[in-house]
Structures are given as C-alpha cells and as structure tokens.
Image (spheres, rainbow, N blue to C red):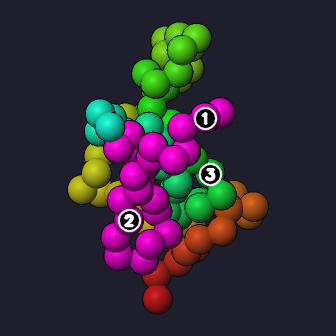
Amino acid sequence: MLTGEDLLSAYEWNSHRAKHFFCSRCGIYTFHRKRAAPDHFGINVFCLEVFDPASVPVRATEGIGMSVVDPDARRQWRGPRNVG
C-alpha cells in the first residue's frame, strides 16, 4: 500500500495481535496483520490494480479448526508454539 493510510480503520480483538484493516469510506477489507505471525500480512489481492489472482496457489482453510498455536511455524515467526 502506497497511500491512503489515513483512510483505514482497524479492527482488533482478544490479544490485539491480529489487526484487520478496512477502508473507512467503502468498508472493503484491505489487509490484516497475522495473529500467529504478526510480522506477516494477509492481503486482499482483489484490491491490487495489476495482479492476477490465478497466478498464486490457493490453500483452503476451515476456520473452526484454526488455532493460534502452530508447532510447525517457522522460527522467524513470533507467536505461540505449543499449548500451555
């Protein structure tokens, strides 16, 4: 993102590690800061001007089974590694 930071609204809950950003004018989700890897971001690629979404692999996820704990997380990712 190059401009428009002043037009973003952020949504956070619980631990406040994850932050979801939306356009304050139209409400579209633009990107989020990840909970389990807060130095990584998820981006709504449909907000990008020159990008072919079919050019990247897709991984299906099931929200009910998701966890902040990832025992296989890369070492450079901060975040929970185990329960307890």
Query: Is 30 drawn above or below residue 65 in the view shown?
Result: above
Dot 3 crowding, Cα within 10 Å, few <14, some 14–19, many 20+: few
Regarding mark 3 in the picture, which secondary structure is present there? Answer: loop
Label 2 or label 3, whichever comes before in sequence order: 2
Q: Is residue 44 magenta?
A: no
Kindly report the distance in space between the C-alpha atoms of the residues bearing marks 1 and 2. 22 Å
* Residue positioned 55% across, 74% down in the render: 80
How far from the left and from the top, in percent, is residue 11? 36, 59
Q: Earlier in the sequence, mark 1 or mark 2?
A: 1
Mark 2–mark 3 contact, CB under 8 Å? no
User: How far from the left and from the top, in percent, is residue 5?
Assistant: 55, 45
Q: List the residue tagged with mark 3.
A: 40
Q: Nearer the viewer, mark 2 or mark 3?
A: 2
- Numbered badge on residue 16: none
Q: Specify which label sits upstream in the sequence, 1 or 3.
A: 1
Left or right: 22 in relation to 71: left
Using the numbered discs, state the Cα–Cα distance from disc 2 to disc 3 in whole angstroms.
16 Å
Q: Amino acid at mark 3?
A: His
Q: Which mark is residue 3?
A: 1
**Which residue in the protein does label 2 denote?**
12
Closer-to-camera residue (10/20): 10
Q: Is residue 56 above or below residue 64?
A: above
User: For the residue marked with disc 1, what is the amino acid?
Assistant: Thr
Residue 8 colored in magenta in the image? yes
**How far is disc 1 from disc 3 in space, using C-alphas?**
19 Å
Residue appearing at x 53%, y 63% in the figure: 36
Magenta stretch? 1-24
Residues at circles 1 and 2 in contact by the CB criterion of under 8 Å: no
| Residue at 74% across, 63% down | 75
